[in-house]
Image (cartoon, helix red, strand yellow):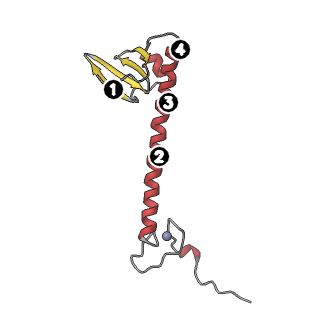
Amino acid sequence: MEYKVEENLEDVSRCLQCGCVIDYGGRPDRKFCSAGCKNRYHNYRRFRRRDVAQKSIFGRLEKNYEILENIIHLGLKGMDRVTLAYMGFDPAYATSYYRLGRKNIYTCFDIRYELTASRIKAVSLMETGESISI
Ligand SMILES: [Zn+2]
């Protein structure tokens, strides 16, 4: 008994979202079976990109926090930026920034510090409920 193959599976286009065979009523290069599948596909990809970006940013903040916490636990008030960089501190990531006179003051969650061209200074834990604004 012979079976006739109705369609060559490699020639069939399938919806990128749900995988069903695309009915070629419209353009021959369609990637989705419906507008709903197209929207779901793009929304999910956008969500994934944002999720990955947020995890990356949060990871860097957590790393910075860990380093700042260690500086406090060691009883230090500051450290040179070369050592900081070696430890993995990334000055581009902070939870707030403001200027106090000529000082550049940053916070990483509840730790406040001053950053100069060569050092991190005045690393301290903020008081509970203390406002970071001036
Ligand atoms: Zn679909």
In the rendered image, the vertical position of residue 36 relative to residue 46, given as above or below: below
Tell me the crowding category of disc 4: few under 14, some 14 to 19, or many 20 or more residues within 10 angstroms, Cα based. few
Placement of the C terminus among the 4 image quadrants: top left
Disc on res. 73: 4
In the rendered image, residue 119, in percent from the top left (x then y), is placed at 39, 14
For the N terminus, give its image quadrant.
bottom right
**Mark 4 vs mark 1, CA separation in Å:** 23 Å
- Discs 3, 4 touching: Cβ within 8 Å: no
Q: Secondary structure at mark 2?
A: helix
- Type of the residue with mark 4: His
Instruction: Say whether residue 66 is left or right of residue 103.
Output: right
- Helix, strand or loop at disc 3? helix
Q: Classify residue 8 by image quadrant.
A: bottom right
Residue 54, how many percent across, how many down?
A: 45, 41
Report how far apart the C-alphas of labels 1 and 3 lie in the structure. 17 Å
Q: Amino acid at mark 1?
A: Tyr
| Residue at the (31%, 20%) spot, across then down | 104
From the image, tell me which residue sits under label 3: 62
Which amino acid type is marked by label 3? Glu
